[in-house]
Amino acid sequence: MTSATDFEPSRTGDRAEGRTHRTAGSPLPESGAPGRRFVVIGGDVARKVCGSLQAAGHAVHHVTQPTDEDLRLALDEEVAGVAVLLDDDAESLRYALAVEHIRPHVKLVVTLFDRTVAEQLVRVVPNCEVTSPADVAAPVLLAACLQPDLLALTHTASGHAGARWTGEGVRLEPYRPPRSLRRRAVLGKVRGQLRPHDGSSRIMLTGLTGLLAVLLSDWAWLVALHHRPPVEALFEATRTVSTVGPVSLHGPDVGYAVFSIAAMLVTLVFAAVFTAGMIDRLLAPRSVGIVGPRALPRAGHVVVVGLGQVGLRLCTRLQALGVGVVAVERNPQAPHLRLARALGVPVVVADAKDRFVLRRLGLLKAQALAAVASDDLDNIAVSVAALAVAPELRVVMRAGDHEAIAETRSLFKIGIVHDLGGLSAAYTTAALTGLRPR
């Protein structure tokens, strides 16, 4: 199904339908000047781009999912630029190549999420500029989580830089997380080691702790009371823990014999507990570790709800700054879970609207919570639940795309709100008109 609308500039700024005519061979205005003609392919974000271009005095031809013939008709007249704003990378790639075939060397802005595909497209079509809502929004969301008085936090060749509005323009300044935040983040990561959040991991750790306690007790008894060499004592203690039994009873020491019997019986219980927890961890895929970088931090961290493109980008940006992060994803089959594990991002598979889940994530000691799932209503529900658990928590929300909450100002009492569609549309509009947005 194809939907095509031509946007003509008018004094009232309203949308006017009809074909845009240009005399064949007439020169196009210079970059940024009004009166140019653009073709925009896509849905909701594309409509916002059309509105912005129209407000600047340009003519716009909008098509949602054009056929090859529709695309040829749209590009039949001279165009200053084409934007392909679709959620499917395969469709975006196809339309981009088709546009380049019909209108070689035309200014082209394409939304692609896969970076490998994006790099190959730019290599084949040098006049193409590739972006994605995730890349545009991540620096803005990062600043909202860590330092809301900045417009964005981005990585540069010399480190990280913060963008600040000075009244005359945007100024970039070097940024480093405050020392207090870095100290809390480090302590939170240390406190998170050997503190599993799920039942099977706790069972496994309990069994392992019990086995080590029996081993250490037997070794200490032999060294302290029987004056055995440490290595020989460790060997005999290991025999007890493995339920083989001690080498000898060491004379008339009835106390040690009773202790060895009790230790072997208790070891059977701890070994069963440890084995049960270990099997459960091996059979069920886990995205949270007990030790190491994927252990859940306990303070100074940011909880990111929604492990889509935006959530994953935000997690990696936070990690690059040394800030602890926990991702929460409701769907156990989410496509980015494997990539998050490879990047060392701890992920809890649960419903973040559950207050019990939020408490176990250490929300009271967290730096911020970012609700960046694709559903605006879910983000609002998560934000309200988070404030119920931690009323002083900084909450960052992705909202503005849903029809029921297109006006986001009413949500400012809940948290810091960002419209990702609006951000992406602004970036695309600037890129099409010849600017260099960052």
Image (spheres, rainbow, N blue to C red):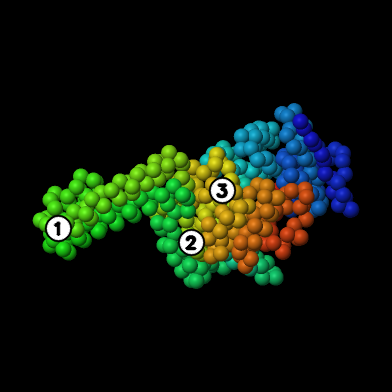
Q: Residues within 10 Å of mark 2 (few under 14, many from 20)?
A: many
Q: Nearer the viewer, residue 248 or 86?
A: 248
Query: Residue 409 location in percent, x, y?
Result: 76, 60
Name the residue that disc number 2 marks.
298
Q: Which of the two labelled residues, at mark 2 and mark 3, occupies the earlier sequence position?
A: 2
User: In the rendered structure, which amino acid carries the disc numbered 1?
Assistant: Asp
- The reply, left or right, for residue 421 in relation to residue 160 is right
Judge left or right: residue 301 versus residue 355. left
Q: Position of residue 318 (x, y in %)?
A: 52, 58
Looking at the rendering, in which quadrant would you find the N terminus?
top right
Q: Nearer the viewer, mark 1 or mark 2?
A: 1
| Labelled disc at residue 99 | none
Name the residue at 79% across, 44% down.
60
Residue at the limit of the structure toward the right, as seen here: 12
Mark 2 is on which residue type?
Arg
Question: In the structure shown, which secondary structural element does the residue marked by tag 2 occupy?
Answer: loop
Q: CA distance from mark 1 to mark 3?
A: 54 Å
Given contact means CB atoms under 8 Å apart, are the residues at marks 1 and 2 in contact?
A: no
Report the residue marked by disc 3: 350
The span from disc 1 to disc 2 (Cα, nearest Å) is 47 Å
Q: Spatial distance from mark 2 to mark 3, Cα to Cα? A: 18 Å
Vertical order, 149 against 255 (above or below): below
Q: What residue type is disc 3 on? A: Ala
Residue 78 shows in this picture: no
For residue 171, what is the image quadrant? bottom right
| Residue 402, position as x, y percentages in the image | 74, 48
Marks 3 and 1: in contact by CB < 8 Å?
no
- Image quarter where the C terminus lies is bottom right
* Nearer to me, 188 or 387: 387
Tell me the quarter of the picture where residue 280 sits.
Answer: top left
Q: Which mark is residue 253?
A: 1
